[in-house]
Amino acid sequence: MWGQVSTARDVKTYKESPEAPQLLEAQEVESLLREIPDHLRGLIACAVYAGLRREELFHLRWEDIRRTCELKADLRITTS
């Protein structure tokens, strides 16, 4: 009937173990940034060089970036 939920008591569940992240070599980063379209290059470079996770990158806002000089900035990272 509608509204009733059947449970799957006999279904085995498996715990997934998280895989270790695969880090890029310096040459791979250079190659990646050369091939990325211009409008995404800054975003990808920020993620790679700051070591941001996907969620951290997608929650990044302009007010989280504080330029400290012409070539440096501080990032405030939040995930919520």
Image: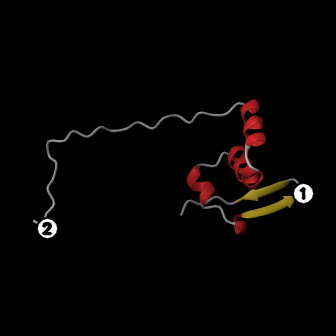
What colour scheme has been applied to the protein in the rendered image? secondary structure
Residue lying farthest to the left in this orientation: 1
**Distance from the alpha carbon under mark 2 to that under mark 1:** 62 Å
Q: Badge 2: how crowded within 10 Å, few (<14), some, or many (20+)? A: few
Secondary-structure class at tag 1: loop
Q: Left or right of 18: which side holds 49?
A: right
Q: Nearer the viewer, residue 43 or 53?
A: 43
- Residue placed at 19% from the left, 41% from the top? 11
Q: How many marks?
A: 2
Q: Amino acid at mark 1?
A: Glu
Secondary-structure class at tag 2: loop
On the image, the x and y values in percent for residue 29 come to 73, 37
The mark nearer the N terminus, 2 or 1, is 2
Q: Which mark is residue 70?
A: 1
Q: Left or right of 9: which side holds 53?
A: right
Q: Nearer the viewer, residue 5 or 34?
A: 34
Q: Which mark is residue 2?
A: 2
Q: Badge 1: how crowded within 10 Å, few (<14), some, or many (20+)? A: few
Q: Amino acid at mark 2?
A: Trp
On the image, the x and y values in percent for residue 30 come to 77, 36
In the rendered image, which quarter is residue 6 located in?
Answer: bottom left
- Residue placed at 14% from the left, 67% from the top? 2
Q: Relative to 29, does residue 80 appear above or below in the rendering?
A: below
